[in-house]
Image (spheres, rainbow, N blue to C red):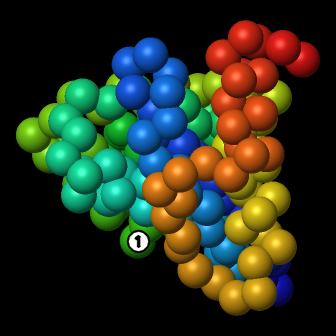
């Protein structure tokens, strides 16, 4: 049975300042699948915005490990979404995927909750952070628990 899960993330410049944010509501049978869909959507967004040097923090270690390994992608039960993401990573750009702990990015967690609470599946882009997000950005930048 599919679960409703939210995904979220921010694109920040080299100083950690907001560029754009996004969140999504996905229906999937596993959290891994929803994380993979969110990574795919964020990579498309970043590519379409013209960024070619990015560091992407992902709080799913398995996804970071699998998506960069063509053989692992081929053998994975989520091949369809992983293959698209693997192809995105192979484009002419420099993408570094970092596995991070979920607690290290309160903004992404907040946006994921917003996505889960959305009334229908979809993907939304936030050009500007709302006040709650601004507070969390500041908190993240100061590494305040």
- Counting labels gives 1
Residue beneath label 1, please? Answer: 80
Question: Which of 96/143 is in front?
Answer: 143
The residue drawn where x is 61% and y is 61% is 23
Image-based side of 94 in relation to 39, left or right: left
The image shows residue 45 at horizontal and vertical percentages of: 35, 57
- Residue 32 in sight from this viewpoint: no
Q: Which residue is most to the left? A: 92
Name which residue lies at 50% across and 22% down. Answer: 16
In the rendered image, residue 85, in percent from the top left (x then y), is placed at: 35, 55
- Residue 97 % position (x, y): 44, 30
Most foreground residue, 7 or 59:
7
Neighbour class for label 1 at 10 Å: few (<14), some, many (≥20)? Answer: few
Taking the spot 36% from the left edge, 39% from the top edge, the residue there is: 69
Relative to 136, residue 124 above or below: below
Give the image quarter of residue 30.
Answer: bottom right
Helix, strand or loop at mark 1? helix
Is 134 displayed left or right of 124 in the figure?
A: right
Q: Nearer the viewer, residue 37 or 141?
A: 141
Instruction: Name the residue at 73% across, 56% down.
Output: 112
For residue 130, above or below residue 6: above
């Amino acid at each position: 049975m599919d679960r409703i899960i939210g995904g979220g993330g921010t694109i920040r410049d080299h100083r950690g300042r907001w560029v754009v944010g996004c969140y999504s509501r996905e229906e999937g049978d596993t959290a891994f699948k929803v994380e993979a869909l969110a990574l795919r959507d964020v990579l498309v967004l970043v590519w379409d915005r013209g960024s070619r040097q990015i560091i992407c923090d992902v709080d799913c270690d398995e996804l970071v490990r699998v998506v960069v390994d063509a053989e692992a992608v081929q053998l994975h039960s989520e091949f369809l979404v992983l293959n698209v993401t693997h192809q995105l990573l192979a484009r002419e750009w420099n993408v570094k995927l970092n596995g991070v702990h979920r607690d290290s990015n309160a903004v992404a967690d907040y946006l994921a909750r917003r996505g889960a609470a959305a009334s229908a599946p979809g993907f939304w882009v936030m050009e500007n952070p709302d006040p709650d997000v601004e507070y969390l950005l500041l908190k993240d930048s100061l590494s305040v628990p």
